[in-house]
């Protein structure tokens, strides 16, 4: 009797993009050849020709008629990716901050059934983070917030602000991501929700890469993001005790 041929896993990469024309091609070229079946780029109202370049590179492009925000962009990314019935969906920022050559390592624990979600952590050592170009204030904020999030969520990660993540199809079909924020706090809601549904989350170390043309959150938006992160953690804590019910969590 012949052994059943193993089906190649279906991997879809999604890119939430806004004015990423300077870094998009470099990011796409770093994705290992033959690993990914589909690359989807959702443009959130760019003014620099990002959609045109993405089409030239052979990506599937979806355009928002107006800027919806980082979270709103990801919602479209995941909604469109699920139409391809993927085994794993990788969210990769097209700003070249994350080493896309590590995509295979990021998704392997999910494909092996050991984890349901993974992310790439840039905080292995302070020396590596700062020498890689991470601004000192971003490193400090990361270090201050990580223990708080770990304590509330009951995990022990080295960072929580990564823009290089992977989710199994089951996670994306379970967590209510359409109910989440359209703003930058979306990732924090996504992680808290994933953990609340008892999915297993892991991390791998990735290099730190900050360039002049990489994206960054402005000070006012950054402050809003940090305040909203604390609010998510507060709601999660109340939900876990039964004092408050949120539809974002199990």
Image: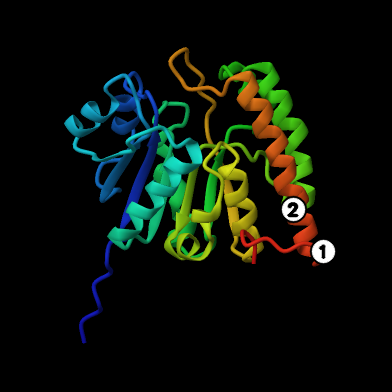
**Do residues under tags 1 and 2 come within 8 Å of each other at their CB atoms?**
no
State how many labels appear: 2
> Which label was assigned to residue 11?
none
**Is residue 154 something that shows in the picture?**
no
Residue 204: percent from left, percent from top: 56, 44
Query: Where the C terminus falls, by quadrant?
Result: bottom right
- Give the labeled residue for mark 1: 243
At horizontal 39% and vertical 31% (from top left) the residue drawn is 94
Q: Nearer the viewer, residue 130 or 72?
A: 72
Picture residue at 44% right of the left edge, 54% below the top:
108
Instruction: Decide if residue 106 is on the left or right side of residue 65.
Output: right
Indicate the colouring scheme. Answer: rainbow
Asked whether residue 23 is in view, the answer is: yes
List x then y, in percent, for residue 75.
44, 48
Q: Nearer the viewer, residue 91 or 236?
A: 236
Q: Residue at x 56, y 44 (%)?
A: 186
Residue 174 x/y as whole percent: 51, 66
Determine the CA span between mark 1 and mark 2.
Answer: 9 Å
State the image quarter where residue 33 is shown: top left
Lower position in the chain sequence, tag 1 or tag 2: 2
Q: Is residue 48 left or right of residue 168?
A: left
Mark 2, residues whose alpha carbon is within 10 Å: few (<14), some, or many (≥20)? Answer: some
State left or right for residue 51 relative to residue 123. left
In the displayed structure, does residue 197 sit left or right of residue 243? left
Residue at (68% x, 60% y) in the render: 246
**Residue at the spot of label 2:** 235
Secondary structure at badge 1 equals loop
């Amino acid at each position: 009797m012949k052994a059943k041929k193993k089906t190649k896993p279906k991997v879809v990469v999604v890119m939430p993009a806004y004015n990423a024309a300077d870094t998009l091609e470099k990011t796409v070229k770093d994705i290992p050849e033959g690993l990914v079946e589909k690359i989807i780029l959702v443009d959130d109202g760019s003014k620099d020709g990002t959609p045109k370049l993405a089409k030239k590179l052979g990506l599937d492009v979806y355009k928002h008629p107006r800027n919806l925000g980082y979270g709103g962009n990801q919602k479209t990314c995941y909604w469109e990716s699920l139409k391809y019935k993927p085994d794993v969906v990788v969210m990769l920022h097209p700003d070249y901050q994350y080493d896309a050559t590590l995509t295979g390592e990021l998704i392997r624990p999910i494909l092996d059934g050991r984890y349901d979600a993974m992310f790439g952590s840039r905080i292995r050592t302070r020396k590596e983070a700062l020498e890689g170009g991470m601004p000192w204030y971003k490193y400090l904020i990361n270090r201050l917030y990580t223990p708080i999030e770990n304590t509330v969520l009951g995990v022990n990660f080295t960072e929580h602000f990564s823009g290089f993540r992977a989710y199994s199809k089951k996670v994306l079909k379970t967590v209510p991501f359409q109910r989440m924020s359209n703003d930058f706090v979306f990732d924090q809601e996504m992680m808290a929700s994933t953990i609340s549904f008892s999915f297993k989350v892991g991390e791998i170390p990735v290099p730190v890469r900050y360039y002049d043309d990489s994206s960054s959150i402005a000070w006012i938006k950054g402050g809003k993001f940090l305040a909203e992160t604390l609010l998510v953690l507060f709601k999660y804590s109340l939900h876990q005790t039964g004092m408050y019910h949120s539809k974002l969590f199990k």
